[in-house]
Amino acid sequence: MKKYKVWILLTSCVLFWSGNYVFGSLVVTELTPVGLTFIRWLFASVILLIVGQKIEKPDWKEVCKQWPKITMLSMTGIIGYNIILYYALYYTSPLNAALVNSINPSFIAIVSAFYLKERITKYHVFGIMISFLGVWIVLTKGNLLQAFNMKYNRGDLLVIAAVITWTSYSVISKKLTTVPPITSTGVSGLMAGIILFPFAMTSGVNYLNMSTLALTAVVYIILFPSLLSFVFWNIGVREIGAGKTGIFLNLNPVFTAFISRAMGKDITWVQVIGGLLVFTGVYITTAFKGKTARLK
């Protein structure tokens, strides 16, 4: 596949993920975080399993053999991450959520260095420090000197919890090498739907009488962030490698900012400065993977 086509797919992938913050914030009060996570992954998992069977042709005996790890993927990356993130959108803006969530690559690099003994360099450390500074600016609204004397936005803190949950998911997924990624996501998503079913049915949501806005958002979240983004992402990893693909994640807060601005939301200078620092830090963290030295 030609490079420009891969770039278009990866740009679309991140654009769809950015829309998840905005659409999620619009409908989470009507569907509840549990209800939205349930209906999103119940349908998305079925489609992903069909796509995975066609593209990856998985060994289902091996899939069954790896059920403990897949269950952990379901509990962390599907249930934990999504519910915490959607709860965060009760209290914080989609842009703030996207900015704080952008430290994910840096956080994963730290945990992977210690837990998986992956290599890390002085460039990684420098990039991680810059990205964390950017997030700190966003969290404190620019009041760095009053960081320990202020009350933080509950939503921003919940996004940090979501980042920690996603890091756990990422570390587990790196150890699951015998099950293809689309298939493992489909199976873990289906598990999440089954686990969440009793909670979703008692959450007070009338799934047969959703508003037009909620229905539109659910269809978008199922088809675009859950299905197309994941397929496009895996095509990108296959064509140009995980390192170069990861750099496209830097577009997430940029797209979220554009979407939020188009919907009439204000963007502050604190968010701009914090976002630029996060962008720079994550770029440094992901761009210098060639020069490595193992962290002791």
Image (cartoon, rainbow, N blue to C red):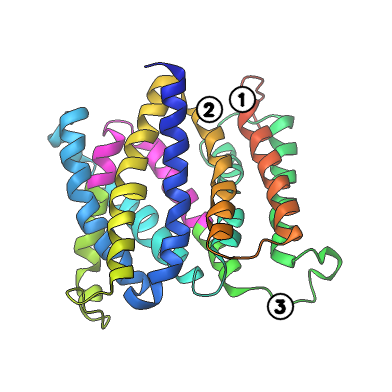
Residue type for callout 1: Lys
**Residue at (74, 45) in percent of width and height:** 129
User: Which disc is residue 289 wearing?
Assistant: 1
- The 10 Å Cα crowd at callout 3, few under 14, some 14 to 19, many 20 or more, is few
Magenta region, mostly helix, strand or loop? helix
Q: Looking at the image, which residue sits at the far bottom?
A: 204
Asked if the magenta segment contains residue 167, the reply would be: yes
Q: Which secondary structure, mark 3?
A: loop
Of label 1 and label 3, which has the lower sequence position? Answer: 3
> Are the residues flagged by discs 1 and 2 in contact, CB closer than 8 Å?
yes
Q: Which secondary structure, mark 2?
A: helix
Q: Which secondary structure, mark 1?
A: loop
Q: Can you give x and y, in whole percent of width and height, for residue 199 in the image?
A: 25, 75
**Residue at (64, 31) in percent of width and height:** 120
Q: Is residue 30 left or right of residue 98?
A: left
**Residue at (17, 49) in percent of width and height:** 46
**Is 67 in front, or is 239?**
239
Residue type for callout 2: Gly
Q: Which residues are magenta?
A: 163-186
Q: Looking at the image, which residue sits at the far top?
A: 2
User: Which disc is residue 243 wearing?
Assistant: 2
The residue carrying mark 3 is 151
Q: Is residue 43 left or right of residue 95?
A: left
